């Protein structure tokens, strides 16, 4: 941009603005445009002309409507929390903002929408969440309407460790455009640490939508208020301000004949003000092992006192590697940055193929990677290449009613050998090996409104889980034990060995004896010559299970997605079809209705 | 008698069990626990199985939020202790597949498998039945495995005695169909008219307590005849078996702190002809069935019944049933209750080899691969295996031409190594970690104590002297401790009561010498006595006799005097 002499700025001001612009992303520029528009409004001048030329995307002239729909579709509570944040900011910005969950959104209304913010997550191999599936399918179907009057922006939620990062958001963004919608603000793709970028997107998108209405004060509100009053209430613990929870107790749950371990951890949240409900998860920021960091620094020939320049000043590289960066796995984005830096042809080729990347990163950590692809790096380059540590989430295994001020976790300890080295999972081994009783770990509560006990405590529940998937059910059963008149409950549990891997066996026996748990069916795959799994136990109890469903039971599945959840889903369909005398299509519909009624909830990973 | 006292709870369980069924089937199907109900555990004994748990792991598993590591002992009845080579291999395979994987040769000529988890119980017991052995009545309030002097081929008499034992074994077995229904049949027979099960001899409540029978052939008392509720002692006249002396009221089991409980040697009550042996046994069993104490299980064995009613009353009651068939007893003499080791030739020209098995435990460890060795022998052996009453094993019926091959295998696996006389006469029960009754170690610990004693025996020139030493983890008496010339009975972890002075041929009980002693105290007390024995024993004098003659303990003449005339010593270490 060149400044012509007619603009009312001094040369210093011009330079400042010019310098500022160089460092800003397109989104930031757009946000700044809105900000100044707001400021000018407040000053009572028609300031929009001042920076009008700098808008990146011109909003279509039709958006004069103050009505806005915020539509979200995600499995975890993340989408919902961003949507609520957006609604709150929008309301304060003078919008008439309506919050809509994709799961219950009447798709026929889409053609009437004028201003739409879409928040959508990606799961597994680039798939929408169950909650978003119907909306996703609808806009990609022949029935999808023309959206010529629509102004929209998309926030994509995802996890960069997955190859098809934010794939669903990308597709929805594209599809809305091809249906005729006007993208008023560029899509933002969020990694697991989404809060800051989501906040930026909300501000930008609202400004863009409001920018068309010259009197909007959205920018001002979002700039001056949102960060303090809406997004982060000072003093409240959150993902960005984790609470340091003390370890009260740790115990290994497997008997000595097992070659694996699962650890039960009890943490104190006393004084934190943190609250949770059964179904929620606990996020933990773990630190890397000293041994791994030392090996990496030796490999890359960094002396132990190597310092590195960061945005917050100089820091010890060693400390940053311990606390801030992922070392126990390698992800596509790290390889991408490495290729950008080194132009390594071999890796470049690998990056072109999803299956090859998958194969390449399997069982590899950062040390393996740099052993295989050595290169000279400055400490700053290393930090630039690496991915920031993400907190690990674990389904909470306790009820706040049964254990006030405590959070219990059931964590599978990840230890394996690959590339001739013993490897350990970051957080599970942090909990099992690197943190002792009375020490503390930074934690936060991650809400999950899609895995909840029925509102009515008398409603029967069927819980299916394998391995550590039993965790939320301990919370469920403990919770209902504290409630008046709880309904029937039935737990299906699977693991490998009954003698050594019957997680919480004594507790389930007690719950059964007390009648808090009505029935338990277990499948131990390695006990017998013929392997049995939870779905086999479901089939054995086909008739009774269907009766429970007919009585209104809620059906829960928690645990491994690939191994278990798919098989359980198929078995459920089979049971409904057989016991209900239904066609395959009718059984599908039965299950879909269960899902819509929130009577079929999953927490799979 | 017992009319005024309520029946013991085990009586209720038996009555309600519908001939030993209880809820065993349901209990086996419950996958949420490795245990079965307390009531069914009582009934399971009569099916030949005890529920146990690995007590070493109890505390660890409680912290792991896991129930105790339950498993089951399965006791396999082997009539007269005789098993085929094929049966040996089958039992060995079952131990590998379902057990821990050792085989215990018991003091009553049975096999025991340990560590069988509940879900494998049926397959294991079914597998045992497929080998034509069974577990019915191996434990519980019923006549157990009938013991018989080992090696029925030693003389022709042994063959006849063995045949009589088989008759007792068969005729005294429970007749309930529950056993086959639960363990052997694949399906419950349904639909047809309901057959009322019945027990012609035992009735619904079986016996008040366990009942043990042994058949001995003098001069060997390898079955410890006197320790049994009922024993038959073969009487041979002019080279022919004419019948058996009848001995009744023996038993080892006691309870610490209860002087109303005591070991007792069986009393000789008469003689019966060979053809009357089953009838005589039934008369004694029925007397005990009707007169035994069903209120207090600690006073329920036949030995207490006899002492309560009086031996003369008991004898005349049996006489009334048997009439002339019960004749005055004939003279007999035992000279030892141990086994004669090594190669011996049988009356039919075949050979047999008696092998010492430490604690009766067939296993592989760093020192000895006994389990593998015996499998290898079994796979070429054309004869039999005979379990002895001393936890040892006879490789029987070896043809002259096969002897070298067996001998080579014995050498290859170091089974012919020389052992001390003390070790060769040692017995130990299972005890910790699996036996629920044990207060202290036995089978796991005795070998190391023997090593320490052997060092001293060598010094005193006693290394080859036969001295009977027995160790149990509690006072219930599985390894017949009160017949040990030296015996240690566990009272607390690493603490034993030390007894001395039993007869070498199993004909005299021992006497308490020191209480609650540790290994240091045991060694400190025993070593000077052994030294003294080596220096001042009379010619041919047995250790048990020596300690009485020289005044270490008083002689126990009858069971009721077991707790009398005790003067305890304390070990004072030399400074």
Image (cartoon, rainbow, N blue to C red):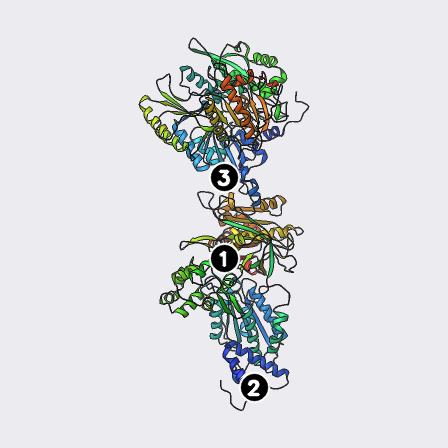
Where residue A50 is drawn, which disc sits there?
Answer: 2
**Do marks 3 and 1 both belong to one polypeptide chain?**
no
> How much space separates mark 3 and mark 2, taking CA atoms?
82 Å
Q: Nearer the viewer, mark 3 or mark 1?
A: 1
Residue sitting farthest toward the bottom: A6
Q: Where is residue A74 in the image (x, y as percent from the top left)?
A: 54, 64
Which chain is indicated by disc 3?
Answer: B
Foreground of the two, B194 or A123 = A123
> How much space separates mark 1 and mark 2, taking CA atoms?
55 Å
- How busy is the neighbourhood of tag 3: few (under 14 within 10 Å), some, or many (20 plus)? some
Q: Do the residues labelled 3 and 1 touch (CB within 8 Å)?
A: no
> How much space separates mark 3 and mark 1, taking CA atoms?
45 Å
Residue sitting farthest toward the right: B4
Foreground of the two, A169 or A305 = A305
Numbered disc 3: secondary structure:
helix
Where residue A21 is drawn, which disc sits there?
Answer: none
Residue for badge 3: B119
- Quarter occupied by residue A101: bottom right
Which chain is indicated by disc 1?
Answer: A
Foreground of the two, A440 or B120 = A440
Q: Do the residues labelled 3 and 2 touch (CB within 8 Å)?
A: no
Residue for badge 1: A290
- Quarter occupied by residue B396: top left
Which chain is indicated by disc 2?
Answer: A
Residue A212 visible in rendering: yes
């Amino acid at each position: 941009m060149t400044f012509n002499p007619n603009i009312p700025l001094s040369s210093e001001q011009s330079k400042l603005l010019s310098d500022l612009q160089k460092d800003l992303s397109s989104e930031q520029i757009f946000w700044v445009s809105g900000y100044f528009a707001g400021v000018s409004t407040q000053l009572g001048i028609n300031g929009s002309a001042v920076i009008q030329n700098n808008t990146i995307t011109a909003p279509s002239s039709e958006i004069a409507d103050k009505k806005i729909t915020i539509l979200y579709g995600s499995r975890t509570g993340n989408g919902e929390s961003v949507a609520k944040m957006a609604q709150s900011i929008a309301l304060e910005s003078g919008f008439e903002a309506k919050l809509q969950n994709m799961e219950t959104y009447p798709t026929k209304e889409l053609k009437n929408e004028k201003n739409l913010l879409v928040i959508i997550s990606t799961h597994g191999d680039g798939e929408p969440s169950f909650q978003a599936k119907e909306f996703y399918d609808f806009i990609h179907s022949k029935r999808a309407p023309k959206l010529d009057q629509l102004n929209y922006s998309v926030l994509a939620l995802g996890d960069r460790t997955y190859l098809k990062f934010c794939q669903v958001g990308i597709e929805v963004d594209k599809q809305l455009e091809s249906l005729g919608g006007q993208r008023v603000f560029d899509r933002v793709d969020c990694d697991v640490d989404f809060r800051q970028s989501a906040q930026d997107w909300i501000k930008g998108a609202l400004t863009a939508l409001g920018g068309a209405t010259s009197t909007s004060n959205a920018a001002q509100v979002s700039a001056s208020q949102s960060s303090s009053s809406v997004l982060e209430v000072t003093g409240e613990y959150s993902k960005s301000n984790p609470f340091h929870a003390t370890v009260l107790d740790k115990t290994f749950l497997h008997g000595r004949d097992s070659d694996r371990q699962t650890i039960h951890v009890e943490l104190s949240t006393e004084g934190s003000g943190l609250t949770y409900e059964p179904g929620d998860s606990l996020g933990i920021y773990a630190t890397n092992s000293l041994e791994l960091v030392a090996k990496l620094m030796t490999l890359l020939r960094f002396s132990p006192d190597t310092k590195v320049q960061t945005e917050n000043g100089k820091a010890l590289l060693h400390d940053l590697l311990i606390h801030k960066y992922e070392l126990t796995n390698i992800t596509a984005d790290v390889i991408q940055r490495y290729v950008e830096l080194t132009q390594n042809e071999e890796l470049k080729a690998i990056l072109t193929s999803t299956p090859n990347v998958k194969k390449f990163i399997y069982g590899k950590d950062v040390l393996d990677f740099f052993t295989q692809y050595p290169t000279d790096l400055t400490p700053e380059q290393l930090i630039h290449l690496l991915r920031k540590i993400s907190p690990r989430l674990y389904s909470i295994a306790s009820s706040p009613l049964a254990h006030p001020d405590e959070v219990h976790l059931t964590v599978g300890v990840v230890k394996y050998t690959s590339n001739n080295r013993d490897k350990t999972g970051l957080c599970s081994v942090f909990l099992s090996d690197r943190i002792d009783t009375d020490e503390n770990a930074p934690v936060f509560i991650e809400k999950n409104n899609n895995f909840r006990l029925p509102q009515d405590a008398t409603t029967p529940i069927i819980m299916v889980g394998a391995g550590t998937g039993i965790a939320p059910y301990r919370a469920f059963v403990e919770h209902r034990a504290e409630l008046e008149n709880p309904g029937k409950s039935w737990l299906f549990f699977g693991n490998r060995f009954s003698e050594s891997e019957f997680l919480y066996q004594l507790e389930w026996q007690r719950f059964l004896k007390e009648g808090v748990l009505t029935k338990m069916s277990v499948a131990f795959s390695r006990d017998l010559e013929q392997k049995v799994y939870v779905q086999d136990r479901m089939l054995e109890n086909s008739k009774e299970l269907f009766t429970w469903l007919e009585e209104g039971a809620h059906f829960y599945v928690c645990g491994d997605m690939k191994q278990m959840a798919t098989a359980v889903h198929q078995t459920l369909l089979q049971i409904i079809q057989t016991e209900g005398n239904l066609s395959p299509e009718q059984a599908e519909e039965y299950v879909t209705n269960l899902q819509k009624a929130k009577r079929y909830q999953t927490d799979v990973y | 008698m017992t009319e005024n006292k309520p029946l013991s709870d085990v009586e209720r369980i038996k009555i309600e069990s519908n001939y030993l069924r209880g809820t065993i089937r349901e209990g086996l199907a419950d996958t949420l626990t490795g245990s079965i109900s307390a009531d069914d555990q009582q009934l399971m004994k009569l099916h030949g199985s005890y529920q146990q748990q690995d007590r070493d792991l109890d505390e660890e598993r409680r912290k792991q939020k896991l129930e105790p590591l339950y498993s089951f002992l399965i006791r396999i009845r082997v009539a007269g202790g005789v098993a085929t080579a094929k049966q040996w291999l089958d039992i060995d395979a079952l131990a590998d597949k379902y057990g821990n994987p050792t085989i215990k040769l018991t003091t009553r000529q049975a096999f025991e498998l340990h560590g069988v988890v509940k879900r494998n119980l049926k397959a294991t017991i079914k597998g045992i039945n497929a080998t034509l052995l069974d577990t019915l009545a191996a434990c519980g309030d019923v006549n157990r495995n009938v013991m018989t002097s080992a090696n029925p081929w030693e003389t022709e008499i042994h063959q006849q005695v063995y045949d009589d034992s088989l008759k007792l074994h068969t005729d005294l077995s429970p007749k309930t169909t529950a056993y086959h229904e639960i363990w052997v049949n694949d399906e419950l027979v349904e639909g047809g008219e309901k057959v009322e099960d019945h027990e012609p001899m035992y009735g619904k409540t079986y016996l008040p307590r366990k009942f043990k029978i042994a058949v001995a052939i003098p001069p060997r008392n390898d079955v410890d005849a006197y320790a049994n509720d009922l024993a038959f002692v073969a009487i041979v006249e002019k080279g022919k078996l004419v019948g058996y002396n009848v001995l009744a009221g023996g038993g080892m089991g006691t309870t610490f702190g209860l002087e109303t409980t005591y070991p007792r040697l069986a009393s000789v009550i008469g003689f019966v002809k060979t053809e009357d042996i089953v009838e005589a046994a039934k008369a004694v069993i029925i007397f005990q069935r009707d007169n035994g104490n069903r209120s207090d299980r600690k006073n329920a064995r036949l030995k207490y019944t006899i002492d309560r009613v009086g031996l003369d009353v008991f004898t005349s009651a049996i006489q009334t049933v048997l009439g002339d068939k019960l004749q005055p007893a004939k003279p007999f003499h035992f000279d030892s209750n141990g086994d004669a080791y090594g190669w011996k030739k049988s009356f039919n020209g075949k050979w047999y080899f008696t092998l010492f098995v430490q604690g009766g435990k067939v296993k592989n460890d760093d020192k000895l691969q006994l389990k593998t060795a015996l499998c290898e022998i079994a796979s070429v052996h054309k004869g039999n295996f005979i379990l002895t009453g001393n936890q040892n094993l006879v490789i029987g019926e070896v043809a002259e031409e096969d002897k070298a091959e067996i001998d080579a295998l014995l050498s290859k696996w170091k089974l012919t190594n020389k052992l001390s006389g003390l070790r060769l006469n040692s017995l130990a029960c299972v005890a910790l970690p699996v036996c629920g009754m044990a207060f202290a170690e036995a089978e796991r610990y005795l070998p190391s104590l023997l090593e320490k004693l052997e060092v001293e025996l060598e010094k005193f020139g006693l290394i080859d002297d036969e001295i009977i030493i027995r160790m149990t983890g509690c006072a219930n008496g599985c390894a017949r401790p009160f017949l040990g010339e030296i015996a240690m009975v566990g009272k607390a972890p690493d603490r034993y009561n030390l007894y001395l002075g039993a007869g070498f041929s199993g004909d005299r009980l021992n006497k308490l010498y020191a209480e609650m002693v540790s290994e240091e105290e045991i060694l400190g007390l025993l070593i000077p006595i052994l030294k003294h024995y080596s220096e001042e024993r009379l010619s041919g004098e047995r250790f048990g006799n020596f300690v009485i003659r020289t005044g270490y303990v008083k002689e126990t003449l009858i069971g009721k005097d077991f707790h009398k005339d005790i003067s305890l010593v304390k070990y004072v270490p030399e400074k």
